[in-house]
Image (tube, rainbow, N blue to C red):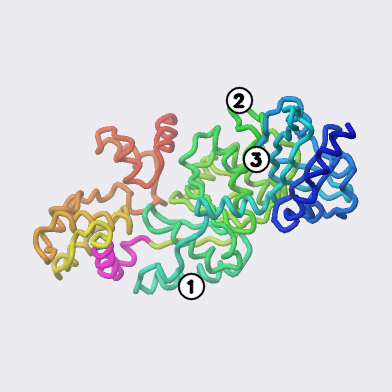
Amino acid sequence: MKSTIKDLASIIDILKCFDFIDESINIIDREGKFVYSNKKLGELFNIPHESIIGHYVQEIYQVKQLKLFDVMETGKPMVDYILTGDLPNGRHEEVINSIYPIYDENEEIIGVCDIFRSYKRSLSAARKIYGFQASYNFKDILHISEIMNDTINTAKEFAGGSKNILIVGESGTGKELFAQAIHNYSSRSEGPFIAVNCASFPTDLIDSELFGYESGAFTGARKGGNIGKFQLAEGGTLFLDEIAEMPIMLQSKLLRVTETKVITKIGGQREIPIDVRIIAATNRDLNLQVSINEFRSDLYYRLSTLSLTIPPLRDRKEDIALLSNFFLQKAYDTDKAGRGLTLSEGALKELFKVEWPGNVRELENVMYRLSIQCKNNIIEKEDVIAHHGQGVNNQKQGLGMTSFTRLDPTIVMKVLASNGGNKKKTAEQLGISRRTIYRMLDKI
């Protein structure tokens, strides 16, 4: 074994340049002793560099997933797995680890190259790659109405705090836009903004999506485990859209996180402290959900410490002209459609008559359709009626689509019947998920 150490030592001088990079690079012999270590390992684990060389790996950090001896035996590298360990000073550390075998001229394994990257730095890189950041600011919320101006001022006040925020509003009112603006206006603006739609994941997946999992936690689990959205949002904001669709069993776990500020991965035992602000959003009446035992009251009160209601478009109709012209320009910028189009006075009056159950999103869709189909430079009243889809004269009044607070099973059944049993179309009109419709059908 002495010859092995000598063989490895012959290249140590060449490796001194690695003291200037931001990853820990180590060479460990067959006995598990450090033959070389650049200065970053000492910085990463807060250990004096001179106490590393010649010492066994187990003396430097205590880990449960030490894979280097497996690599020495099999010759198969292990790349990018999460390594957690307790240091001699009692501090707990989590890093990204990769191990590669080292061969001599006889193709015998004489040691391994062990590389560590900061876990937090890896998270930061992942956020940049996947674009986990907020794009919108309050200046992007187009309005001239006083009610929207008051709402924005309230949101700015909330942004200055640290408590969780609940954003309430009908489908299409711009809840995520407000969430992003609040994040960018807050002291967490330099941190990540992570958005999760609670209705888009099956019940058995949203748990792992939020909290992550350890290696081997369940069948099909990724080797090395996976981090969840809470950890990705560290130091920033986690936006939980359609929070009313979160399964009741998972709500209790979320409640604990809001109280303790720690999470536990699926299949894990260690509690991980987190620094995350939660902004939740819903188009449902959570008070009603609480009364029918579909949403936990204690979680509701935790999330709604600061509650912001986004007004529907029918309550801010003075913004329709501004928004309509903006969407016409956006259609041209996107698809070169609708160049030079303007709205006649009659067309605007017709737009003002619409109740807009789909709110700003519906208005944008209508403007895009008009920009494609309108044959003249001026959009007239008749164009609005012809291309609105439902049309002003066909608005389904009295079905409760104008307010999420009026939603009840009877209303859902009426809308479902009017749509010939089409659950997808009904869910879109009411601003709810198909899962909610199925739950209501089960109770009838």
Q: Is residue 141 above or below residue 432?
A: below
Label 3: few (<14), some (14–19) or many (≥20) C-alpha neighbours in 10 Å = some
Q: CA distance from mark 1 to mark 3?
A: 45 Å
Q: Where does the C terminus fall, quadrant-wise?
A: top left
Give yes or no for residue 46 being in the magenta stretch: no
Instruction: Indicate left or right for 365 with 188 as reference.
Output: left
Ranked by sequence position, the earlier of labels 2 and 1 is 1
Q: Amino acid at mark 2?
A: Thr
Identify the secondary structure beneath mark 1.
helix
Foreground disc of the pair 2, 3: 3
The spot of residue 260 in percent (x, y) is 72, 50
Instruction: Report which residue position mark 3 lands on.
Output: 80
Q: Amino acid at mark 3?
A: Asp
Q: Residue at x 78, y 42 (%)?
A: 27
Instruction: Report which residue position mark 1 lands on.
Output: 153
Identify the secondary structure beneath mark 2.
loop
Foreground disc of the pair 2, 1: 2
The spot of residue 419 in percent (x, y) is 25, 37
Along the viewing direction, whichever of 381 and 205 lies nearer the viewer: 205
